[in-house]
Image (spheres, coloured by chain):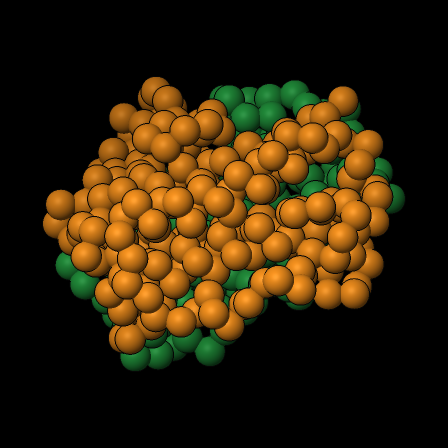
Amino acid sequence: MPAAEITTLLTYLDQAFKGPAWHGPPLSGILRGVSADVALRVPGPGRHNIWEYALHAAYWKCIARRRITGDDSIEFERGPSDWPATPAVVTEATWKADRALLKREHDLLRAAVAKLSPRDLAKKGKGSRWTREAEIIGIASHDLYHAGQIGLTKRLVGA
Amino acid sequence: MDALIRSIEGEFRRHKALGEGAFGQVPEAALSASGLNEGNSLAVMCWHISGNLKSRFTDFLTADGEKPWRDRDEEFVARSVSREEFVAKWEEGWKVLLDTLGGLHDADLAKQVVIRGQSLPVHEALHRSLAHISYHVGQVVYLSHAIVGAGWTYLSIPPGGSAAYNAAPTREKPATRAGAVASR
């Protein structure tokens, strides 16, 4: 069983991603019920669509895991970095697969965090200027930062 | 050791800087304009964020976080404000939060606080607040970007700039001031 400090950080991660989140919808909750068609709608020039937000969140969970573990072999399976492109074929099935990718990256991240010991937390992650603790708190906030934006995007695109 | 409390404080400061980097680009008149599809304006979001922080973190360890003097519904009333009023309201809430965080230590995280009559540990109250602020600052940035449009200055990695950024990740320290906007 993880130490109390680790359990607390896992709670942060899980509440941001799947809830229950006191402030409102978590990331996975705000994606629930969004169709592929809606996920692809761009609210305006130069703005991201919901599908892109989902892949962006998955990408940074992967990078956070790489930094926390120090395992350079970890690479996100899609490119480019930061804002991975939506797939060439966009269907309900590929949208479902990308939401599953997001969940998979969340699960892998939390598994990596669960293996940490409390004394690891104050040390910087590999290739990061953040401590592991800050990295974990930051990636949880990242989910909610974009959840708020997805909520506004849904409103704009008529979801 | 205050590592955890300082990490939380750093993340709050990063979001403060993100918000300031965003609404600082918005023309004064647009700060009060209705949001997307008649949604909340930036001013309403600012009043809500500030009101929430001020209520939660005034006498944080000793009084209920939902203060009797807070009028939450009033925070959501459409308002017309100057930039000076906007920034003053924003700072009012953040000052209460940051002053409180500055006096907390990791040893305080297990203490109990009360919000709306419900008792919870300090670490959970801080996490709830950070979650709430992250969510709304994301919206402030989003709405500001929509208002500014093509002239927008990106607060994190600009489109197409990831490779250059990864080679020299200069924005990864928690920001302590607006303009020094942190990224991931």
Residue at point 28%, 63% (across, down): B80
Query: Which chain does the green colour mark?
Result: A
Observer-nearest of B35 and A96 = B35
Q: Quadrant of the C terminus of chain A?
A: bottom left
Vertically, is A32 above or below B142?
A: below
Q: Is residue B92 left or right of residue B101?
A: left
Q: Is B118 drawn above or below residue B93 in the view shown?
A: below
Q: Position of residue B175 (x, y in %)?
A: 45, 29
Q: Residue at x 48, y 55 (%)?
A: B49
Visible residue check, residue A64: no
Taking depth in this image into account, of B74 and B169 the one nearest to the observer is B74
Instruction: Determine if residue B17 is in view.
Output: yes
- Say left or right for B102 vs B178: right
Q: How many marks?
A: 0
- Residue B116: percent from the left, percent from the top? 73, 65
In the image, farthest residue toward the left: B150
Q: Is residue B166 left or right of residue B100?
A: left
In this view, B82 is above or below B105: below
Residue positioned most to the right: A1
User: Which residue is the extreme one toward the front?
Assistant: B69
Residue beneath the point at 51% across and 72% down: B73
Residue name at image x 29 percent, y 75 percent:
B38
Instruction: Say whether residue B161 is left or right of residue A77.
Output: left
Which quadrant of the view contains residue A17?
bottom right
Q: Position of residue B88 (x, y in %)?
A: 39, 45
Chain B color in figure: orange
Image quadrant holding the N terminus of chain A, namely top right
Expressed as whole percent of the image width and height from the top left, the position of residue B16 reads: 44, 41
